[in-house]
Image (tube, rainbow, N blue to C red):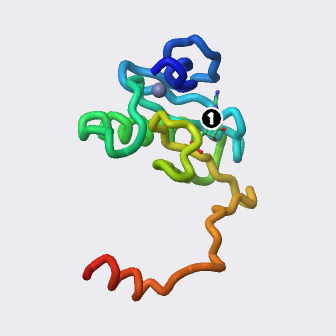
Amino acid sequence: MQDCIFCKINKKEMPSYTIYEDDFVRVFLDIHPSTNGDCLIIPKKHIVTIDDVDEELMLDILKVIKKMRTFLKEKLDCDGLTIVQNNDYGQEVKHFHIHLTPRYLKDGLQHTFNKDHLVNPEDVYNQITN
Ligand code: AMP
Ligand code: ZN
């Protein structure tokens, strides 16, 4: 994909702080980090949402995520790891990626979903199961 910034990073046409790469995936630091070590894991091939991720790739990604958790813990002494992945709405970059956000005690990071408009779980359950 010509205009995709993450494809450009994969082709090294754009710089990145890559901290891990193999034949299938790359992990690099997010340019606007939420915490120290906030990074993204992306496939080397251009795909857009989770719908396009086949099982083989998902397994590769999962293995690297587990590896990165150990790595980030060792290197940054983080206290946790939060994993987030946006599809379509909420997805700024249309190249599949998963946010790996190291967590630290008292980092103050809160997820930004608006809890004021929470619906009744029973209503949603009925909507989903009917
Ligand atoms: P999302 O909203 O889930 O699509 O997240 C896209 C993420 O990509 C954001 O956290 C951005 O800060 C990050 N990002 C955008 N451009 C770059 C870049 N050139 N290098 C590293 N991270 C980037
Ligand atoms: Zn791409």
Residue at the image point whose x is 64% and y is 62% from the top:
111
Q: Is residue 72 above or below residue 112?
A: above
- Ligand 1 has an atom within 8 Å of the beta carbon of the residue at disc 1: no
Q: Position of residue 110 (x, y in %)?
A: 68, 62
Q: Position of residue 56 (x, y in %)?
A: 25, 35
Residue at the image point whose x is 38% and y is 24% from the top:
45
Q: Is residue 110 above or below residue 118?
A: above
User: Which residue corresponds to mark 1?
Assistant: 75
Q: Position of residue 80 (x, y in %)?
A: 58, 53
Crowding near pointer 1: few (<14 within 10 Å), some, many (20+)?
A: few
Residue at the image point whose x is 64% and y is 35% from the top:
30
Q: Position of residue 65 (x, y in %)?
A: 44, 40
Q: Quadrant of residue 23?
A: top left
Out of 100 and 93, give the one closest to the viewer. Answer: 93
Quarter of the image that includes the N terminus: top left
Name the secondary structure under disc 1. helix
Residue at the image point whose x is 37% and y is 45% from the top:
50
| Ligand 1 quarter of the rendering | top right
Residue type for callout 1: Lys
